[in-house]
Amino acid sequence: MNLDFTAIAALVVVLVLFFAIFKLSKKLDFTLLVIVALAAGVAIGFIFHGHTSWITPIGKAYVSVLSALVSPLIIVAIISSITSLENTKQLKGIGFRSIGWLITTTFFAIMLALGLGLVFGVGRNAYLSIDGLDTTTFQSKVTSFSEIFINFFPRNVISDIAEENTIPMIFTAILVAVAYVFVAHDNEEKVKPFKNLVEALKEIIFKILDWVIELTPYAVLTLVATSVGNGINSSGMIWSLVMLLIVCFIAFIIDSYLINAVLLKVFAKVNPIKFFKKILPAQIVAFSTQSSAGTLPVATEILTDKIGVSGKVANVTTPLGTTIGMPGCAGIWPILVSLYGIYGLGINFSLTDYITLVVVALFVSFGTAGVPGTATVTTASVLTVMGLPLELIVLTIPISALADTGRTATNITGAMVSATIVARQEDSLDDEIFEKEDEEENKAVTA
């Protein structure tokens, strides 16, 4: 066996850089740390071009762990969100309407992202090459629409989890959660241990996810180094990432302020401009914390105190909006990353394939979680089902932290818009509160 001493040297340098990243993690914020790791990865790739075989397994291990988290996170997130409904009346009324509107807003976001991604051709000149694999490998993995439809329905729950069959897992989780609500309606004490177990599992999985996300800079360094070392056009990749980020924010703005404005005017019958002025504090909190769940208290308070949404609607729709739907993390971002890979790897997608992509993204939006890093999980789910490489997630991580600010603000805006529409349809929207608050603000400005 001939040892590649240059590859061994590359591994030694990477390990030294790992130590440096660990030290810098105590001084730099996460975004800067990822950028530093990206720059180091590009440098390592150029210096040790063609000799990165010893560092490739490190990045592969990160992708594998990330992939392993997808199934349990989806299952517990869906069950937790639906079982939060107190009774069958809430499920049938506020619950179904909330889920319906949350999914509707996400569908509009998905279609918007698809349209913008195709128009701008995100990733078109990136010329991506992941681990030296031929792009035809990925083309052969693209699942047809008929296969996706057949696979909507579970055949064996255990094998679906083991084989990471995302769609049937979502179907099963929804079925279990709805059944729980009906059983709990008759005898809550009987199924309460199940609810406690789900919530406990949710906390544990989120903690593991936090740990995995903390390892991101190390993964970025190794995977980018491998990609550059295998001949990736780094200049093309960098400019394509900048374009991807720009298109993302264009989508966030259009979705948040144009599409939602129409929905508010037509279905909630409120003034969109006044509405957006009132929810601005929640958007700022979401933008800065990058956590939909963390913004929940602020969003709920604004909905009840300034918008006039009743507590029973605000306390159901908004929490559901942190686990179901989420147009930024589960709609816009996964679609654009998928298109980035499709164009960058030169994969030929047919109309049927794009329809399949939309359906898959919509189904995956049932299993989101309103914490930092959620978009990574939802994107991993979409890529897995579509047969696209998970390494695309790591290649887009350098801009993901910046995109997450807009993603989270878009998420919370969609949830608040959905809550307002549901409140109007449930006759639980107090127009006096909406107008009164506005009048008081005008008086304050005049004074």
Image (spheres, rainbow, N blue to C red):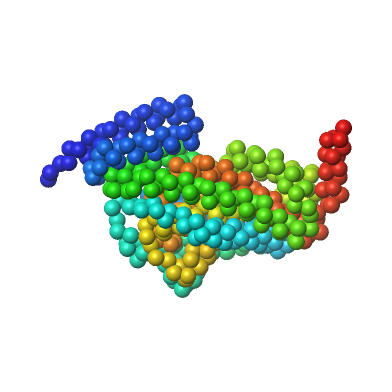
Where is residue 8 drawn, in percent x and y? 21, 37
Drawn side of residue 348 relative to residue 370, left or right: left
For the N terminus, the image quarter is top left
Is residue 282 or residue 257 the one in the foreground? 257
**Height in image: 417 above or below 41?**
below
Is residue 237 or residue 380 the one in the foreground? 237
Is residue 89 or residue 289 the one in the foreground? 289
Q: Quadrant of residue 133?
A: bottom left
Q: Is residue 331 visible?
A: yes
Please name the residue shown 64% across and 48% down the image: 412
Q: Is residue 158 visible?
A: no
Is residue 80 or residue 289 the one in the foreground? 289
Drawn side of residue 309 relative to residue 15, left or right: right
For the C terminus, the image quarter is top right
Where is residue 194 drawn, in percent x and y? 58, 53
Q: Quadrant of residue 112?
A: bottom right
Drawn side of residue 311 relative to residue 72, left or right: right
Tally of marks: 0
Please name the residue shown 32% across and 42% down the image: 225
Residue at the left extreme of this rendering? 1
Please name the residue shown 83% across and 35% down the image: 445
Where is residue 198 drawn, in percent x and y? 56, 51
Please name the residue shown 28% across and 53% down the image: 132
